[in-house]
Image (cartoon, rainbow, N blue to C red):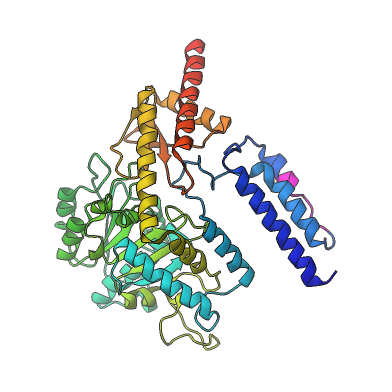
Amino acid sequence: MSEMVETAELLRTAANEITRYLASLPERPVAAPVEPEALRAGFGSALPAGPSPPHTVLAALCAAAEPGLVATAGPRYFGFVTGGSLPSATAADLLAVGWDQNAFNRVLSPAADAAEHCAGRWLKELLGIPATASTGFVTGGQAANTVGLAAARHRVLADAGWDVESRGLAGAPPVRIVASEERHATIDRALRLLGFGTSAVTEVRADPTGAIDLDDLARVLDQGSGPLIGCLQAGNVNTGACDDLRAATDLLHQHGGWAHVDGAFGLWASANPDTATLVDGVELADSWACDGHKWLNVPYDSGFAFCADPEAHAAAVSYTAAYLVGSGGEAALADFTLESSRRARGFAVWAALRELGRSGVAELVGRTCALTRRFASALAEGGAEIGNDIVLNQALVRFSSDEHTDRVIAEVQREGTCWLGGTTWRGRRYIRVSVSNWSTKESDVDRSAEAVLRAAASVGAVAGSAG
């Protein structure tokens, strides 16, 4: 058998395995209890002394991984604001792997360059971001926040007469970082990586919904001067609340500051007329972070960093070298990301946007928000407390006590009908429900709500009898 014939057969086997797995998602337990050491043992211990046939390797991988696979791509996974992957996006990502394109610049892959330019244009149109903004296809929200804040660091210090790229931060004018007490943890990690440190943050109070308190923001801004970066949020991970982007950005600009919006999932509210008002004024900001592998439902390792100041964007993260053909001239894909060699993420993003179109994205956002409300309503009717006004696709659910709530979480995860995680909000424990998957149906929500209520009754009875 020729090498290409063997490769073709291997790829068909892999495709069949993927198809089998995807077909199992609607009914398989979302997560099954597994012993970590046993799972690791299935992958082997000592490195093999010699080569193995590819088909043997693939069979061994499937057998070893199967017990530890979590159906995050399925319709009843409601944790961590996780989407699945649309059919066209899955297929496009397989092609991206097979084509093995390096999306560094146009010289390395004209196709990757063209796909990302088109997809970037479509993304900005859907998200309400100015068409003139630059776009970097990054790994996710963490990288997007880091890139956006790096661009902010460049601009505010350059405006103060300091070249941070050549001189670093030692001796630089101090930069004020203003952020809500409800900011996402990736903001803090980005600030650590960029040399500011988390102690540089001046916290602003949040209102009862989790959005930034504008009066407190104004108070904080009036207390200082000099280079200023403000971190705003579209989509609180607990409540879905969005900061008043128009008013907050205006306050920051009045004080000469840069407005960065962490909109990992909340920026997608722009795509649906019923939720777009939540992000009114989004176009006024200076940089934006957003995920693709959440609400757009593309494979993991997909995020976007947008910047209204492309020059600052490129100055903050790009580099040139004599051996890099095509670098140093017109801005390239890699000038807006933290990676050099990377796969062509834009193919899957382009495919998802082409599959859905404007109306499909709007429908996806609207439907999953409605399903979240349906989920919360069913749980409330069953005796649960709902801890937030449901404005997007996030619901907080609580039972009689912190202990009871945590027991329900553990039982739901053990039982496997659906998967839900826990969180602490305003000092109390909650179940966090996030509906983000394109394939989730009303029947999935109803079935999952019934499972949660069964778990609440079961662990409540056990707790009561033990008392």
Q: Main secondary structure of the magenta part?
A: loop
The residue at 75%/67% (across/down) is 7
What residue is drawn where x is 52% and y is 16%? 462
Left or right: 370 as drawn, with respect to 337: left
**Magenta residue span:** 40-48
Dividing the picture into quadrants, the one containing residue 37 is: top right
Q: Give how far across and how far down residue 409 sits, in percent.
A: 48, 31
Q: Residue 67's spot in the image, x, y percent?
A: 68, 41
Asked if residue 151 is among those painted magenta in the image, a careful observer would answer no
Instruction: Quarter of the image for the N terminus: give it.
Output: bottom right
Q: Depth check: 467 or 352 in front?
A: 352
Q: Position of residue 226 (x, y in %)?
A: 20, 67
Q: Name the residue at 56% across, 41% down.
A: 26
> Relative to residue 159, is residue 43 depicted above or below?
above
Q: In the image, 150: left or right of 2?
A: left
Rendered view: 192 above or below 428: below
Instruction: Please say whether residue 237 is visible from this viewpoint.
Output: no
What is the x, y in percent for residue 69?
Answer: 62, 45
Tell which of 132 and 141 is nearer to you: 132
43 falls in the magenta region: yes
For the residue pair 202 and 335, the one nearer the viewer reads as 335
* Along the viewing direction, whichever of 298 and 336 lies nearer the viewer: 298
Query: From this viewpoint, is residue 94 visible?
Result: yes
Q: Using the image, determine if residue 127 lies above or below residue 80.
A: below
